[in-house]
Image (cartoon, rainbow, N blue to C red):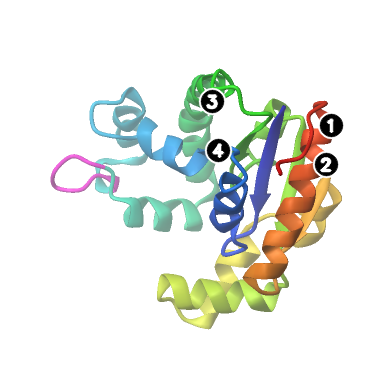
Amino acid sequence: MIIGVTGGIASGKSTVARAFSSQGIPWVDADEVAREVVAPGEPALDEIAEQLGREVLAPDGSLNRRALRELVFADPEAREQLERITHPRIRERLVVHLERLQAQGAPYVLLVSPLLFESGQDAMVDRCLVIDVPEPTQIARTAARDGVDEAQARAIVAAQMSREERLARADDVIDNSADEADLAAQVAELDRQYRQAVGLPPES
């Protein structure tokens, strides 16, 4: 069984994944795979530079992530071009990573992806787990973590899928607005349910 884990920016997806990891559950991070497919020497990087302009490359030929982020944030057409180039490649590589994890014999595995719904990666999973926090919490965490002001943080949150739509598409939800103990308890309960779903006893 594959569980897709998603949520808005600064919702705590990686924190949740690490909590599942402590229960013996492996995970693959779609963001890491996305970085792999645009590494120097990868065909996607050449295609990005060709279609979006060489100004998205750093002097050493690697991807200038800040320049690319600013471009696609301001230009929806550029964002669509980037997605056409990267999403199929990310999906192919995710399949390889997930199959490798499943071969290790864990009761289930996680696909952690901020764009699980937007990229169509939800079609690859059996259940969708949304990590939810109130929007003011998202904004505050984003500003603190990324060193941006509140207005920029609000713009980033506003550019993503709405909280309401994300929750409407969820099979399971974790509320990550409280403390670590509360989060750990929610993860343990979901782990019990997921193990039960695949016919295994819960971890002792």
Name the residue that disc number 3 marks: 101
| Disc number for residue 27 | 4
Instruction: State the CA–CA distance, disc 1 to disc 3.
Output: 19 Å
Q: Secondary structure at mark 3?
A: helix
Please, what is the three-letter code of the amino acid marked with disc 2? Gln
Q: Secondary structure at mark 4?
A: strand
Please, what is the three-letter code of the amino acid marked with disc 1? Ala
Kindly identify the residue that appears in the image at 34 percent across and 28 percent down: 47
Kindly identify the residue that appears in the image at 59 percent across and 43 percent down: 112
Residue in front for this viewpoint, 27 or 202: 202
In the drawing, does residue 187 fall left or right of residue 78? right
Instruction: State the CA–CA distance, disc 2 to disc 3.
Output: 20 Å
Is there CB contact under 8 Å for labels 3 and 4? Answer: yes
**Residue 153 at x, y = what percent?**
54, 73
Instruction: State the CA–CA distance, disc 4 to disc 1.
Output: 18 Å
Q: For marks 2 and 3, give the one nearer the viewer.
A: 2
Q: Secondary structure at mark 1?
A: helix
